[in-house]
Image: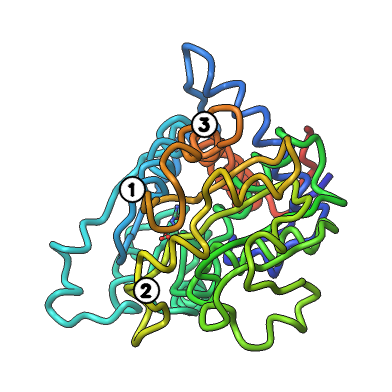
Amino acid sequence: MTFHARHLLGIEHLSPLDITTLLDLAEQYVTLNRARNKHTDVLAGLTQINMFFENSTRTQASFELAGKRLGADVMNMEVAASSIKKGETLIDTALTLNAMHPDLLVVRHPQSGAVDLLAQKVNCAVLNAGDGRHEHPTQALLDALTIRRAKGRLHRLTIAICGDIAHSRVARSNILLLGKMESRLRLIGPPTLIPSGAADWGVEVYDDMAEGLRDADVVMMLRLQKERMDGGFIPSGREYYHRYGLDAAKLSHAKPDAIVMHPGPMNRGVEIDGTIADDINRSVIQEQVEMGVAVRMAAMDLLARNLRAGPVEVMV
Ligand code: NCD
């Protein structure tokens, strides 16, 4: 099996075989991460720089842990303390860092397309840790690994993605990935939070939770991304919860063994009821976090192999 990409900028550029290769390798890292000694030297001698221009808890922590467990020298650039605050452009900052010879650059940026642009200017491998409302490829990959482990496959599942689809890079990357792997996708949310044109993506669109969740295998909830909203998209938090918040009554329309997912950060009592989020028989939210470290290790391992030797055989 091979993995040809030089960067990981989005799911858009990956083939089903690339996705399977990455997830198979991530399985090995799940095992390593559960062992007492979590250290390997796969990235020994390589330098990883994390540049987060937007807040992050899970993604930044897991990229940092992933790099350290693989033996890389990991630097977190403190954006708040950097020259960006003095007016330096993103590209100038990137060129400055590039001159220090990093091998892997992990970037999160509030503008869609900023990470692709940056990748054209540097000669290391770039990993997109989320750009605006465009893509968040490692999130979709960790979601896929979580689903595959719970359901045994990624094809022919009915997967409902619920809530603020319009502002969500997580939704976009998941729609691309799960579509490539031949699952049936349903988007559920108020019409104001469903992107125009969604009906042409080969997905079903619902604005009623009971209808949209009927017989679903996977229920993926999303946060209302108010920081990307420039107006009144929802009537009120209370009404939103009443109509779209996942509670036991709404979940009862899904299959009895349906799993509940959320990329975090979660707003309890807005898009999801706290008891559902904490129900270990239904919620795989903590497992998503665990899979995040393994998937990021696999992604950096594969990109580093390509850095060293060009496309290579990957034994999984
Ligand atoms: C998401 C993000 O930043 O896109 N969080 C994450 O990476 N786990 C989702 C969100 O912010 O709601």
Q: Secondary structure at mark 1?
A: loop
Which numbered marker is on residue 279?
3
Instruction: Name the residue carrying label 2.
Output: 110
- Give the answer, above or below, for where 49 lies relative to 252: below
- In percent of width and height, residue 11 lies at 66, 64
Beta carbon at label 1 within 8 Å of ligand 1: yes
Distance from Cα at disc 1 to Cα at disc 3: 22 Å
Q: Nearer the viewer, residue 16 or 51?
A: 16
| Amino acid bearing label 2 | Pro
Which numbered marker is on residue 57?
1
At label 3, counting other C-alpha atoms closer than 10 Å, the crowd grade (few under 14, some 14-19, many 20 or more) is: few
Q: Nearer the viewer, residue 121 or 195?
A: 195
Beta carbon at label 2 within 8 Å of ligand 1: no
First reached walking from the N terminus: tag 1 or tag 3: 1
| Amino acid bearing label 3 | Asp
Q: Quadrant of ligand 1?
A: bottom left
Residue beneath the point at 61% across and 41% down: 298
Number of numbered labels in the structure image: 3
